[in-house]
């Protein structure tokens, strides 16, 4: 069927035959086969390369692009500020929840701001799993990642979003 020669019945000699039979499945002298079909193969890139469109890689690419844009527009304000990524927010080392201070960020599930240590930490999983998207597609997920980075920088600088980049969003 479909251009292949018929191998015989299930219990016949042609289906499971001896060492040199055409219906042979695996064996010492030939490649391993999946149910008599072509040899087992791995993916084209192999196991060593990460998926270029995976969740972690996509988040970091989108977030880093936004960070680089903001650093190019606001070089003096963001000089020496460490912007990092973590999977989820972590409680204190002792297991107690973090203290809420006047320095706390406005969106602690998505990011945290520490002005004393000059650090902004973005949390990947809460941002990617946020239920606030009205359309769940790659563009809107990217927009939300960019929005969270932008809000975190605004929160760190203590400025409103429309003050940070005046005229940037006037066409909306």
Image (cartoon, helix red, strand yellow):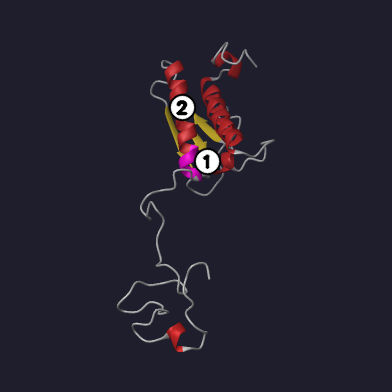
Q: Which mark is residue 67?
A: 2
Q: Which mark is residue 78?
A: none
**Residue lying furthest top:** 167
- Give the x, y percent position of residue 22: 39, 79
Q: Front-most of 135 and 158?
A: 135
Which residue has dot 1 on it? 124
Q: Is residue 158 left or right of residue 135?
A: left
The magenta stretch is 55-59
Q: Considering only vertical position in the picture, is 132 above or below 118?
A: below
Q: Secondary structure at mark 2?
A: helix
Give the Cα separation between the discs numbered 1 and 2.
15 Å
At a point 31% along the width and 79% down the height, the residue shown is 28
Q: Quadrant of the C terminus?
A: top right
The part of the image, by quadrant, that contains residue 17 is bottom left
- Give the x, y percent position of residue 94: 49, 48
Q: Considering only vertical position in the picture, is 128 above or below 19?
A: above
Q: Considering only vertical position in the picture, is 48 above or below 161?
A: below
Q: Is residue 30 left or right of residue 140?
A: left
Residue 53 can be seen in this image: yes
Q: Front-most of 52 and 141?
A: 52
Q: Is residue 20 left or right of residue 137?
A: left
Secondary structure mostly seen in the magenta stretch: helix
Q: Residues within 10 Å of mark 1 (few under 14, many from 20)?
A: many
**Residue lying furthest bottom:** 12
Answer whether labels 1 and 2 touch (C-beta < 8 Å). Answer: no
| Residue 2 located within the stretch drawn in magenta | no
**Residue lying furthest right:** 134
Number of marks in picture: 2
At a point 57% along the width and 41% down the height, the residue shown is 128
Q: Residues within 10 Å of mark 2 (few under 14, many from 20)?
A: some
């Amino acid at each position: 069927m479909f251009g292949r020669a018929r191998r015989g019945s299930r219990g016949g000699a042609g289906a499971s035959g001896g060492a040199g039979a055409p219906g042979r499945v695996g064996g010492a002298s030939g490649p391993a086969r999946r149910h008599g079909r072509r040899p087992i193969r791995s993916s084209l890139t192999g196991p060593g390369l990460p998926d270029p469109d995976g969740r972690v890689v996509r988040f970091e690419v989108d977030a880093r692009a936004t960070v680089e844009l903001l650093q190019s527009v606001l070089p003096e304000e963001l000089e020496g500020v460490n912007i990092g990524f973590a999977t989820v927010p972590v409680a204190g080392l002792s297991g107690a929840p973090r203290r809420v201070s006047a320095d706390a960020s406005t969106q602690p599930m998505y990011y945290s701001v520490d002005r004393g240590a000059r650090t902004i930490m973005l949390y990947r999983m809460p941002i990617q799993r946020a239920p606030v998207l009205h359309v769940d597609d790659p563009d809107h997920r990217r927009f939300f990642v960019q929005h969270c980075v932008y809000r975190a920088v605004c929160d760190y600088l203590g400025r409103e979003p429309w003050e940070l980049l005046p005229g940037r969003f006037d066409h909306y």
